Image: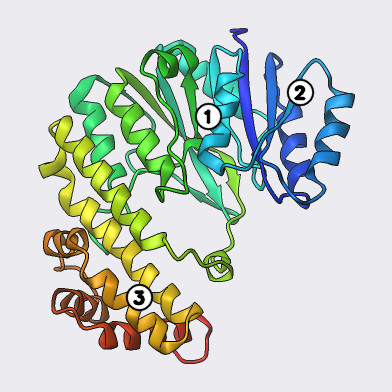
Amino acid sequence: MNELVSVIVPIYNVEDTLERCIDSILQQTYMNIEIILVNDSSPDDSETICQKYKSEHPNIIKYFKKENEGLGLTRNYGMKRANGNYVVFVDSDDYIEKDMITQMMQCAVDNNADIVASSFVYNGHTQAEVGGEKLYIGKKEIQSLINRMSGNKNCKTNDQFNVSACTKLYSKHFLDQHVLVFKSEREYIWEDMAFNVDAFSCAERIYVMDSAFYHYDYNPESLTHSYDANRFEKIMKMYCYLKDKLNDIGMYDLCKFRLSNNFLGNARTSFKLEALFNEHHVAEKNICRMLKNEVLQEIVTNCDSSSLSLQQKIFNIAIVCKRPKLILFLSNIQNIRKKGIIN
């Protein structure tokens, strides 16, 4: 087991965490790796850090700087320059356990897997994949993963399969054979989800591990520090892409309730961000525009409301009845609760 593994690291505004990330990759027990650092025109001091590591490890580290295009297209840039038999993605604000590549490569080789998926550690807490360790072979078994990837069964059941590309190891031949690439985050939200639905629908053998190697240090407040005026439209565009893809592979009827629940939750987040960032009259106007979106109305119609909280049910009624004032009121209440002002 000595195949070359390419580790692709997109870089943007991560000078505080970049060294930890690169160190965790250099400390891998698997020796035959190349590290591809791709600087997406980061305005901070990330380039200095990259150049330092490249000079210290010239036989392992490749460094590229490109125009700013966002995460998905930066990963694609790295894939085009990868020489490995297998590919791993590591985001530069995260880090990995030292035996991650060894363990995942062992599973890939032993099981002739196109993709190996592992569990992960989220803010210090291990998040094991539901279903445990298993080799999934053939269309029917792999479709069960795609179904779970679409979203949770309901609001009380946390059984969604992790859609992140960073907890996966991919055969490079498999990626090239099926021309699998990431979409631009400037057009879509959840480019990882689209990538993995595409990839899983092409795969013949997927091994899911119980072990957790990848560490996310996710800040739950991070969404509140940025506002994207086109966020809602990107969500609806991604829903349409996934709906069409699932229809193409004959899975939409199976997945539509999970998918709708998932994207409806994301739409509610868009409402809350409007309330948080904009003046009342601007937020109401934007929400009014969103409520006229036919895709949103389709999503709320498909949603399984049986397990929703009372407030979520009221949200849904307000969407169907196109009541922007009520949605803005509910969004403000949730934003206040999140800040801890009221319980």
Q: Amino acid at mark 3?
A: Asn
Q: Nearer the viewer, mark 2 or mark 3?
A: 3
Label 1 or label 2, whichever comes before in sequence order? 2
Q: Nearer the viewer, mark 1 or mark 2?
A: 1
Q: Marks 1 and 2, Cα distance to the nearest angstrom?
A: 18 Å
Look at 61% across and 12% down and name the residue there. 83
Position in image of residue 175 (x %, y %)? 43, 19
Name the mark on residue 267: none
Position in image of residue 271 (x %, y %)? 36, 74
Tell me the residue that label 2 is attached to.
Answer: 61
Instruction: Kindly indicate the quadrant of the structure image that contains residue 261.
Output: bottom left
Q: Marks 1 and 3, Cα distance to the nearest angstrom?
A: 33 Å
Tell me the residue that label 1 is attached to.
Answer: 76
Q: Nearer the viewer, mark 1 or mark 3?
A: 3
**Secondary structure of the residue carrying numbered label 1:** helix
Q: Amino acid at mark 2?
A: Ile
Tell me the crowding category of disc 3: few under 14, some 14 to 19, or many 20 or more residues within 10 angstroms, Cα based: some
- Relative to 10, is 106 above or below? above
Tell me the residue that label 3 is attached to.
Answer: 286
